[in-house]
Image (cartoon, helix red, strand yellow):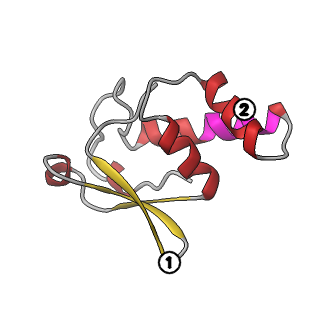
């Protein structure tokens, strides 16, 4: 999986926020607020990743079990898919842009 291009991630007031830029801003209106671990996964998804590779990234940074990290990755990927933010997914339906991956 890989995130769609056309977004930039910024840290504003201690929060990680992704916003659409360029052509993507014409179809995606809003912001995506991410947790610290969500920002780590977001950055990793600039290149093709598997759930296992993303789980390994979380394990390298956080003191959690493999099962906890894998569950977090599955939840994050599910929210990204629901919002249409992965390249291998269909565009979001109306209202999907309001969903916020954590």
Q: Which x, y percent locates residue 84?
A: 35, 38
Secondary structure beneath disc 1? Answer: loop
Write down the region rendered in magenta: 67-75
How many numbered marks appear? Answer: 2
Mark in front: 2 vs 1: 1
Query: Residue 11 magenta-drawn?
Result: no
Identify the residue under disc 1. Answer: 13
Asked which secondary structure carries label 2, the reply is helix
- Residue 70 numbered mark, or none: 2
Q: Are marks 2 and 1 in contact (CB under 8 Å)?
A: no
The C terminus, quarter of image: bottom right
x and y, in percent, of residue 44 in the image: 51, 36
Residue placed most toward the observer, 96 or 50: 50
The residue that appears at 66% across and 22% down in the rendered structure is: 52
How far from the left and from the top, in percent, is residue 28?
Answer: 24, 52
Q: Residue at x 68, y 41 (%)?
A: 72
Foreground pick, 84 / 48: 48
Q: Mark 2 or mark 1, which has the lower sequence index?
A: 1
As drawn, 45 above or below 38: above
Residue at position x 50%, y 51% from top? 101
In the picture provided, is 34 more to the left or to the right than 86? Answer: right
Q: CA distance from mark 2 to mark 1?
A: 29 Å
């Amino acid at each position: 999986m890989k995130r769609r291009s056309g977004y930039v991630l910024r840290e504003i007031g201690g929060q990680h926020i992704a916003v659409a830029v360029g052509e993507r801003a014409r179809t995606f209106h809003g912001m995506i607020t991410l947790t610290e671990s969500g920002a780590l996964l977001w950055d990793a998804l600039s290149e093709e990743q598997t759930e296992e590779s993303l789980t390994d990234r979380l394990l390298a940074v956080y003191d959690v079990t493999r099962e906890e990290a894998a569950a977090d990755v599955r939840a994050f990927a599910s929210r990204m898919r629901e919002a249409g933010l992965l390249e291998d997914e269909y565009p979001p339906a109306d209202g999907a842009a309001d969903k916020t991956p954590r």
